[in-house]
Amino acid sequence: MRNRAKCKLCKSVIESLEDNAQELIACACGEIAIMGGSSHYYVEVKDKFENMLRIDDNEQEVSVKVKQSESQDTKEEAMEIKPTRDQLLEMLLEQLRVSENLPPHVRSSFVTYLDLEAALWLVYAIFKQG
């Protein structure tokens, strides 16, 4: 899944492409910023999470829910994205299509545990949606 977001204030669409990059990609007005590429989704906001939309792989704007989680010393903000079951199934189908279109030498190479873990989390999310 691509790592993209849209700022509701300046209408900028931003995308983080590098999985290992530690640099935040910010919108034009500086309200929202993301990083993490396709490996994880890290978000910062200047004022309100309500000023941000997630952009999925089908170019659909998805509003985000922010949940407060209690850490030992401080409260941290955690973003929770809840795709529908159909969106999760489409994500799984897209992963299969990408895999099928890889060159033969890549398809016969080993899969990392991170690849396996990502696939298992997606299957888990689909079954959990029930």
Image (tube, rainbow, N blue to C red):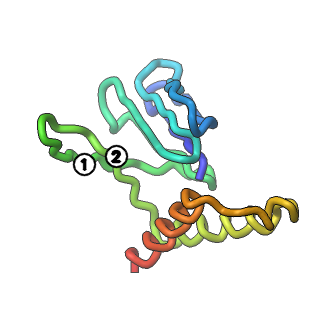
Question: Which sits in the foreground, 12 or 73?
Answer: 73
Q: Which residue is mark 1?
A: 67
Which part of the image, by quadrant, shows the C terminus? bottom left
26 or 113, which lies in front?
Answer: 113
Residue 79 is tagged as 2
Question: Mark 2 to mark 1: distance in Å?
Answer: 6 Å
Graded by Cα atoms within 10 Å as few (under 14), some (14 to 19) or many (20 or more), the crowding at tag 2 reads: some
Disc 2 + disc 1, Cβ < 8 Å: yes
Q: Is residue 125 left or right of residue 112?
A: left
Under mark 2, the amino acid is Met
Q: Residues within 10 Å of mark 1 (few under 14, many from 20)?
A: few
- Tell whether 94 sits left or right of 127: right
SS under mark 2 = strand
Q: What is the number of the mark on residue 92?
A: none
Residue 24 sits above or below residue 127 on the image: above
**Label 1 sits on what residue type?**
Lys
Relative image position of residue 129 (x, y in whole percent): 39, 75
